Amino acid sequence: MSAPMNICSHGSNLGKPAGALIVVGLGVATPGHLTIEARSYIVAADKLLYYGAGPLGRCYLMDLNDSAEDLVEDYTHWPGAGDHYKIVARILDEVRRGKNVCVAFFGHPGSYSEASHDVIRVAKSEGFRAVMLASVSLQDALVADLGVHTGYGCQAWLATDFVLQRPRVDRGSHVILWNIGAIAESFSLETSLGSDEGLRVLAERLAELYSLDHHVTIYEPALYPICDPWVDELPVAELPYAAVQRMSTLCIPPDRARPVDRRSADRLGIDQTTLRLLGDTLPSRAVRGAACDRVEFAER
C-alpha cells in the first residue's frame, strides 16, 4: 500500500502551495537497504528523481515508478559546485510545478550531501512541505563490516576537508575519512590533485599524527547481496601506493587510550580498583595491539 504524499499531516496545509518534497535514502545495497517507508513514498510520488542508485538500483526504481529519472547524466567525474546547484534547481523545478516529488539519494540522504539539505531548506522557505527520512548510511555499513564500536568515540571528515582544514584529531577514537580517492576533485576538475597526489598529501598528514607503521583500513561496501565488501589493511607508509576508488573510505583505529579524569571518577564514586576491573569496557579496548590491563588517571 502506498503512502500519502501529505508528508506534514500533523499541521495545517491551508495556505501552502501545491507540491511536496520528500527526500529518502536508498541505503548502500539497493534494494535490500530500502526501508518500507521510503519505498511507499517512491511508489506514490508524482515524480521520482534519484542520485547514485547504480545499475541494479536504477532498474528497481524504474520498476517501482515509471517517472523515475536520474539526476546525474555523467558519473565519470566527481560532482562539483556546478553539479550541486543543477541538482537542487532540477528538484525544485518539479516541486514548483505542484508535484509530489520524491528524491532518492545513495546511502543516507543527509550524510555528506549538501544538495539534499539545501533543497529541503529552499523548499521550506518557499512554503512547500519538505521532509527527509533516515536510511542506512555508508558509516552504518562500515561499522557492521569492520566491527567499529563508535561508542568509544568516532570522528569523521571528508578526506579533502581533513587535509585542507587540518582539524584536531582525537587519537583515542576511530577516525573515518570519506572519498579518499577524490581529494580536491569537487573544487576544480582541471586542477584536481588526482588520487595519487591526494593520497600522498593524506599520508603525509597522517604521518604527522600517527607512526608510519600504524595500520589503517581502506574500505568499500558491498553494493549487491552476492558481493563482499572490499577491505584492505595496510600501514600508513603504504597508503600513497594503494589502489582506491573515488568513494573509498579510510578507517583509522586509535593508537592510544584516553586517560580517565580523576575528579569526575571521584565524584561518581568510582575508585581506581573498580576502573581496572571495568577496563575492557573503556576506550582503551579499541586500541590495536595495546595491552589494556590498566587505566591511566589524568591529574588535574
Image (tube, rainbow, N blue to C red):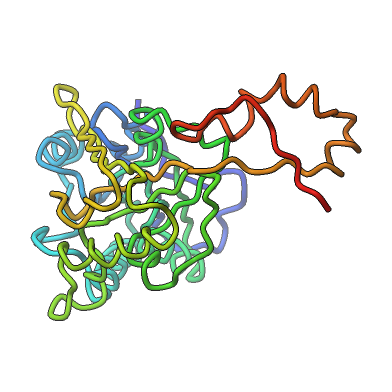
Position of residue 270 relative to residue 169, above or below, is above
Percent of width and height locating residue 298: 76, 46
Lateral position of residue 141 relative to residue 11, left or right: left
- Residue at image coords 15%, 26%: 227
Residue located 19% across and 55% down the image: 246
Q: Total of numbered circles in the picture?
A: 0
Nearest the viewer among 123 and 291 is 291
- Residue 181 screen position, x and y as percent: 20, 57
Q: Is residue 188 left or right of residue 266?
A: left
Q: Quadrant of the N terminus?
A: top left
The location of residue 141, given as percent across then percent down, is 35, 34
Q: In the drawing, does residue 284 fall left or right of residue 250?
A: right
| As drawn, 174 above or below 164 | above
Q: In this rendered view, identify the residue nearer to me: 251 or 36.
A: 251
Q: Position of residue 216 (x, y in %)?
A: 33, 43
| 222 w.r.t. 218: above or below | above
